[in-house]
Image (spheres, grey):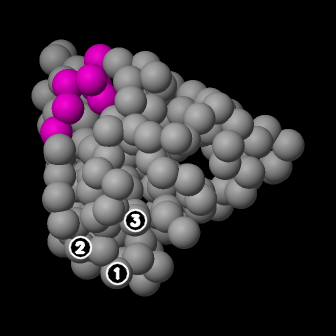
């Protein structure tokens, strides 16, 4: 059984250049808290696909300083500029041997990705499809190869919020 973790970056401040917006002090705290929460559930994230925006890179740093172990990271402009299909392409491109994958990106792409993969009859999936607050995580169990994962194939979702 594999795990797909979809996360929106932690709280970011305002800035004139969106791509360079930094996390707030509260956002750093959120990322560290979520790092602790995820580390309690997963020994290691085998592969993390991360938007190349400053706030997502800082969120990843917060996750790891909170105790989460990440084996391989790939930064991608597609996760900043793209839509849910670009995120799904990253999932599909994940090496087959990886069992736990993190997608760390932005709204509305993360909630749209859940909408693409989810069986929408479950309440946690519907909650996630309505939007991810900063530092929110959706977790799904995956029973197929990453490159076989498609629309409506993930019936069970869990939602986590940083405390």
**Dot 1, how many residues are within 10 Å of its Cα: few (below 14), some (14-19), or many (20+)?**
few
**Residue 56 location, x and y as percent?**
25, 42
Q: Which residue is mark 2?
A: 69
Q: Which mark is residue 141?
A: none
Q: Which mark is residue 43?
A: 1
**Dot 2, how many residues are within 10 Å of its Cα: few (below 14), some (14-19), or many (20+)?**
some
**Residue 16 location, x and y as percent?**
18, 16
Quarter of the image for residue 160 reads: bottom right
**Residue 117 location, x and y as percent?**
62, 38
Q: CA distance from mark 3 to mark 1?
A: 11 Å
Q: Which residue is mark 3?
A: 99
Considering the numbered disc 2 on the image, is that residue within a helix, a strand or a loop?
loop
Q: Is residue 82 left or right of residue 77?
A: right
**Dot 3, how many residues are within 10 Å of its Cα: few (below 14), some (14-19), or many (20+)?**
some
Residue drawn at x 29%, y 51% is 95
Check whether the beta carbons of the residues at disc 3 and disc 1 lie within 8 A of each other. Answer: no
Q: Is residue 67 left or right of residue 87?
A: left
Residue drawn at x 18%, y 66% is 71
Residue 41 visible, this angle: yes
Considering the numbered disc 3 on the image, is that residue within a helix, a strand or a loop?
loop
* Residue 77 painted magenta: yes
Q: CA distance from mark 2 to mark 1?
A: 7 Å
Check whether the beta carbons of the residues at disc 2 and disc 1 lie within 8 A of each other. Answer: yes
Report the magenta residues as a range: 75-81
Marks 3 and 2, the one that precedes in the sequence = 2
């Amino acid at each position: 059984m594999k795990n797909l973790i979809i996360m929106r970056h932690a709280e970011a401040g305002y800035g004139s250049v969106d791509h360079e917006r930094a996390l707030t002090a509260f956002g750093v705290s959120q990322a560290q808290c979520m790092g602790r929460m995820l580390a309690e559930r997963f020994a290691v994230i085998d592969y993390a696909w991360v938007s190349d925006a400053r706030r997502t890179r800082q969120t990843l740093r917060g996750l790891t300083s909170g105790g989460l172990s990440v084996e391989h990271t790939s930064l991608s402009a597609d996760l900043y500029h793209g839509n849910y299909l670009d995120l799904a392409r990253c999932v599909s491109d994940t090496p087959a041997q990886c069992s736990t994958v993190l997608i760390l990106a932005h709204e509305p792409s993360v909630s749209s990705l859940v909408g693409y993969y989810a069986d929408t009859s479950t309440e946690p999936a519907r909650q996630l499809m309505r939007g991810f607050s900063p530092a929110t995580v959706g977790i799904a169990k995956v029973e197929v190869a990453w490159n076989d994962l498609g629309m409506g194939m993930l019936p069970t979702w869990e939602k986590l919020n940083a405390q």
